[in-house]
């Protein structure tokens, strides 16, 4: 079997590939970690939490992301919370 970076994922948005989507998601999580977010957080979930605290940058980022994907930051925070709860039982 050959490795194909452009395998289409039927669940991903049209034109987004499985490996590309995973790469971008993990890059987002790595960038979030470098910026001080938790291990399961993306930049969007960190922005959502900052927005809830009233931080100007969180409000600005969530406002822009909301134009692209309705409730993006809220969904990202919910996703990060589900991942955190799933990891709570992991002992390594």
Image (cartoon, rainbow, N blue to C red):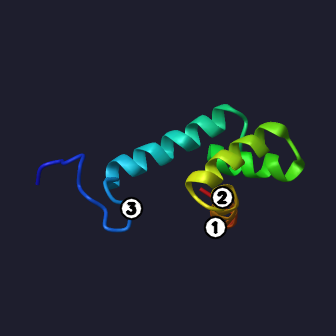
Q: Which residue is identified by label 2?
A: 80
Q: CA distance from mark 1 to mark 3?
A: 23 Å
Query: In which quarter of the view is residue 14 placed?
Result: bottom left
Query: In which quarter of the view is residue 64 placed?
Result: top right
Q: CA distance from mark 3 to mark 2?
A: 19 Å
Q: Residue at x 81, y 49 (%)?
A: 51
Q: Which residue is identified by label 3?
A: 12
Q: Nearer the viewer, mark 1 or mark 3?
A: 3
Image side of residue 12 versus residue 44, left or right: left
Q: Earlier in the sequence, mark 2 or mark 1?
A: 2
Q: Residue furthest left?
A: 1
Q: CA distance from mark 2 to mark 1?
A: 10 Å
Residue 62 at x, y percent in the picture: 70, 48
Observer able to see residue 66:
yes
**Number of numbered discs:** 3
Q: Residues within 10 Å of mark 2 (few under 14, many from 20)?
A: many
Q: Which residue is identified by label 1?
A: 86
Element at label 1: helix
Residue 70 at x, y percent in the picture: 62, 61
Q: Earlier in the sequence, mark 3 or mark 2?
A: 3
User: Looking at the rendering, in which quadrant would you find the N terminus?
Assistant: bottom left
Q: Residues within 10 Å of mark 3 (few under 14, many from 20)?
A: few
Query: In which quarter of the view is residue 35 placed?
Result: top right
Q: Residues within 10 Å of mark 1 (few under 14, many from 20)?
A: few
Q: Looking at the image, is 19 positioned above or below residue 13?
A: above
Q: Looking at the image, is 77 positioned above or below residue 37?
A: below
Of 39 and 72, nearer the camera is 72
Q: Residue furthest front?
A: 67
Q: Residue at x 66, y 61 (%)?
A: 71
């Amino acid at each position: 079997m050959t490795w194909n970076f452009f395998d289409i994922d039927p669940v991903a948005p049209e034109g987004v590939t499985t490996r590309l989507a995973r790469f971008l998601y993990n890059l987002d999580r790595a960038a979030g970690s470098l910026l001080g977010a938790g291990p399961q957080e993306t930049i969007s979930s960190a922005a959502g939490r900052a927005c809830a605290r009233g931080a100007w940058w969180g409000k600005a980022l969530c406002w822009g992301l909301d134009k692209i994907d309705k409730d993006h930051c809220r969904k990202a925070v919910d996703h990060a919370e589900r991942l955190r709860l799933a990891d709570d039982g992991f002992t390594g």
